[in-house]
Amino acid sequence: MTRRGADAGDLAAGAFVLGLGGVAMWAASVIPTSPIYAQVGPKVVPYIVAAGLIGLGSLLVVAALRGGWSRDVPEVAEAGPKNPRALGWLGGGLLLNLLLIGPLGFSLSAAVQFVCTARAFGSRTPLRDAAIALAVSLGAFFLFVEALGVNIGAGVLEGAILRALGQEVM
Amino acid sequence: MDSLSGLALGFGNALSLANLAWALLGCFLGTAIGVLPGIGPALTIALLLPITFQVSATGAFILFCGVFYGAMYGGSTTSILLNTPGESGSIITALEGAKMARNGRAGPALATAAIGSFVAGMVGTLGIAFLGPVIVEWALVLGPAEYFSLMVLCFVTVSAVLGSSALRGMTSLFFGLMLGLVGIDLQTGQPRLTFGVPELLDGVNVVLVAVALFAVGEALHMAWHHHAGKIEVLPVGRLMLSRQDWKRSFWPWVRGAGLGFPFGVLPAGGTEMPTMLSYYAERKLAKPEHQKEFGTTGAIEGVAGPEAANNAAAAGILVPMLTLGLPTSATAAIMLSAFQSYGINPGPLLFTQQADLVWTLIASLFIANVMLVVLNLPLVGLWVRILKIPVPQLYGGILVFATIGTYGISNSVMDLVILYALGVVAMFMRRFDFPVAPVVIGMILGPMAEQALRQALTISQGDWTTFVTRPGSAMILALAALALAGPRIWAAAARRR
């Protein structure tokens, strides 16, 4: 077997796990000591889990330094070039949803997200997508509100529809 | 209660109009999401969890189990007609099924998959009905120490034995365990791992994690690797099985079901292993004149066997879930959290304290199987339509439901921030080949394991050796160690030879 260099991506993944373990260790150490007597306090298991993550992270780092695992995974090795533009559209849609869901309410905000998502996956018909999006998001809204009894505050659009139907706005 | 009177009681309840309606709805929904690539039973049940506030436990679980079984049936349709397996259990089905479809035999492939699923579902459900009470009898003597050891065994099998790498599987598991710790410690009331965020005091919601892993992460990953291209749905043709097809399918169905069920029951869970074994067995056992069809024109045995194994294993997964409260798949883990939201403790007492619920559920599984074979064969045209939903709008829709499923339970933008952050983590997990199912299982089973650990140590007055001095517990832990080390020793021994 030929010696292989470290795999930068895998190294980053290992380092992330190691960092996560470190954060967990710190978080476990700041858990207040319980005034209630307990044979096993609230800190024991968090310490075990944190130690586990640090151990696993170290092993992953070692594996990455020895050449990593990604190139042995067919799905990763054979994957085509990345598509940052599609990821950008999708990520942008999620961010817009975060910003708009408060002021506009669910349906409009989710519709914007739908159009961005469809665009990310190659749709070139934003107007048609918007129409489908509104139908889907309004459908989802009333399904969850009526059938599942989940109370999602009515936004601009939902409120207008409820008023038009002569119903009380939630 | 013995199995027969239990089933009688169960069928009495399950045949009520309301429960039949729940089963039908579940089967319909399950098949639809099974057919659709990019959405599976774990995500669907997670999104449906809010109905636990509205509907009785029996109705909700009939619905969930219909979704669970239906997704297995629907998954085979996608594997055969699109050659893109929706979940790990149907990878093998795609192998031969798609080849049959390409050679104009999609109809028989779909038919043998559906009937095989039916045979296996029946065998598996009978297995649940007769094996369940036996396991319960045995499980009632288990103390907290044994329970903790059982959960450790479950952790090891779902993360280290299944999947391509023990190291990455265990990492996923520990990430899940960490998520499970977040929130107020129930025993002492101390906040843990909340980082001062008040929203985290109640813990991280299961729905949120499931949606992040299975919807947001998946969508991000798919976008990152997206390439324009048309997907091609192969034509179905005639569904009828010829006399010869029946003859060639029958024994593979039976063998597949017999092989799959035990794999599902053992916490060695998972559907990959039994489907793979069934495939190799059928390829060996096929008549020489049919053997050459494997890998070329597509052999019907290679669809019938693995598809039966897949469904029987899926049914088997319900055995440890109902009798011990041990989930061995992400979907089972989410169903377990539904039990918790009803205040029902799954475990050996379920069969005695909730006998009505359990037996109605089991009877409904039989009914669901009959419904599914009807839904899948004559209505196959409908599912082909659903398959043709274009990818952009499909993912758009999935994310709409993902958003409402998480935002709806809390109306909190903070939850959406956590959802998307976990989604990005999930995207990188896909990229670096970390399995996601152990995260869900660790998150849901972790707190239960901690409780068992603390109870065991309280009983033993802080003596950690209790786990190895109690014979039952020691045996289970030895099994776990074997499951972890066994494959490595085996591989080393094989290399030496």
Image (tube, rainbow, N blue to C red):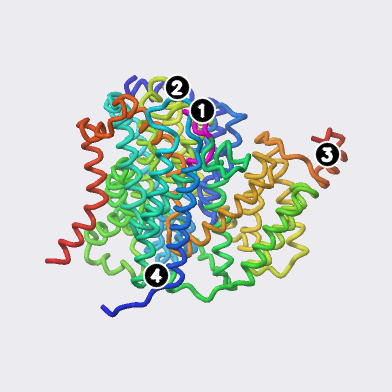
Residue B147 image offset from top left, x and y in percent: 32, 32
Chain holding disc 1? B
Q: Is residue B237 visible?
A: no
Contact between marks 2 and 1 (CB within 8 A): the answer is yes
Q: Is residue A159 left or right of residue A78?
A: right
Q: Quadrant of the C terminus of chain A?
A: top right
Q: Which residues are magenta?
A: B180-190
Residue type at mark 3: give it: Leu
Contact between marks 1 and 4 (CB within 8 A): the answer is no
Q: CA distance from mark 3 to mark 2?
A: 41 Å
| Badge number at residue A74 | 4
Q: Which residue is mark 1?
A: B58
Q: Is residue A75 left or right of residue A66?
A: right
Residue type at mark 4: give it: Pro
Contact between marks 4 and 2 (CB within 8 A): the answer is no
Chain holding disc 2? B
